[in-house]
Amino acid sequence: MKIPFTKMHGLGNNYIYIDLFHTELPEDRLSELAVKMSNQNTGIGSDGMILIHPAETADVGMRIFNKDGSEGMNCGNGLRCTAKYAYETGIVKKSEFTIQTKANIVQAIVHKNSGQEVEKVTIDMGEPILQREQIPMLGEAGTTVIDEPFPVADTTLQVTAVSMGNPHVITVVDAIDEAPLTTLGPIIEKDERFPEGVNTEFIEIVSDEEIHFRVWERGSGVTEACGTGACAAVVAATLNDKVTKGKQIVVHLAGGDLMIEWKEDGHIWMTGGAETIASGIFNA
Ligand SMILES: N[C@H](CCC[C@H](N)C(=O)O)C(=O)O
C-alpha cells in the first residue's frame, strides 16, 4: 500500500500526518501503520502518526497515534500542525476554524507571514479536567490531585494530575536537568494508579510567568515537546501557586518555547510554532 504523507513538527515533537480528505486508510491497520511509520530504522521516524480527517461537527478532525501504536485523545503540537496543514492545503479557507479531536472540539487561529505561510498557531484548548476519576487516577472519586504524595520506586513525589483530554501527572523539581525523567517516566507511565496510563512531566519554576518543562510521553517516551503536557503543567503550576493565573506563561520545552495562558474564563490558550519537514510516499 502506498501512502502519501507529510512529516511535520511542533517544537521537535514530530508526527507523520496522513490527509484522509485525499487518502483512505483501513481502520484495522492504523495502530500497525503508526508503529511502522514511527520506526526510525525501517520507517520514516517520528513520535507517532496523526490523521487529518473530515469531521461532522468541526471544520477538520484530528486523531493521534503514539509510536507504540496506542491512540491518544489529544495532541497540542499536533493541533498546531494540523491547523497549518489544513489552512495551507485549502482544506479550510479561513484563519480561524475548529478542529475535532477524540477529547473535544477546539478553536484554532493561524498566524501567517507575508507569503501566506503559517508560522505560528494559537489554539483555545478548552478547560482542563481536574476530577481524579476523569484523569483517570485511582483514589477517592470527586477529589482533585494537587501536591499529593505519590510513592514510586524508591522515592515519593509530590504530584498534581491534570487531563487535557489525555492524562498528565506533573512534579515540580528544583533543577529540570536533574529530573528523573528516564528513570521514573516509564515506571509512572504504566503505574496501576493510572488505569489508562499517563504522560509524566517535570517542571522547574523560573518565575511566576516562566517554567522549564520535560516530558516522558505515554506511548512515545521522551519527546522534545508536548503541547497538552505544557498546558497541564501551567494548570498544575497555577494550582500550586507557582505561577499567576491569567498571565502568559513562557514554557521552555526541550524543543523550544510555548506561550500558555490559563484565562479567567477557565480556557487554556496555547501559542507556538508548527513546521513542515517533508512529504512523500510511504510503502506500507
Ligand atoms: N505530544 C502530544 C501529546 C501526545 C499525548 C500522547 N502521548 C498520549 O496522551 O497518549 C502533545 O503535543 O500534546
Image: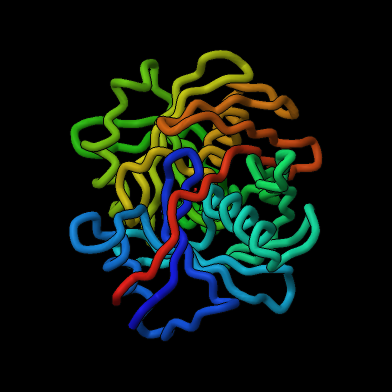
**Depth order, front residue of 211/84:** 84
Q: Is residue 172 left or right of residue 207?
A: left
Residue 116 appears left or right of 155? right
- Say which quarter of the image contains residue 44: bottom left
Quarter the C terminus occupies: bottom left
Residue 5 pos. (x, y %): 44, 66
Q: Give the mark count.
A: 0
Name the foreground residue: 149 vs 180: 180
Please tell me in which quadrant of the rendered image residue 169 appears: top left
- Above or below, 81 relative to 99: above
Q: In this view, does 63 lie above or below 272?
A: below
Residue drawn at 69 percent across, 68 percent down: 91
Q: Nearer the viewer, residue 254 or 201?
A: 254
What residue lies at 53% left-to-right and 35% top-to-bottom? 233
Residue 257: percent from left, percent from top = 54, 29
Res. 243 image quadrant: top right
Q: Position of residue 36 (x, y in %)?
A: 27, 68
User: Which residue is situated farthest in the top direction here?
Assistant: 207
Q: Which corner quadrant holds the N terminus?
A: bottom left
Question: From this viewpoint, is residue 162 visible?
Answer: no
Residue 106, can we see it?
yes
Q: Where is residue 200 in the image (x, y as percent from the top left)?
A: 38, 42
| Residue occupying the point 62% across, 69% down | 61
Q: How is the image coloured?
A: rainbow
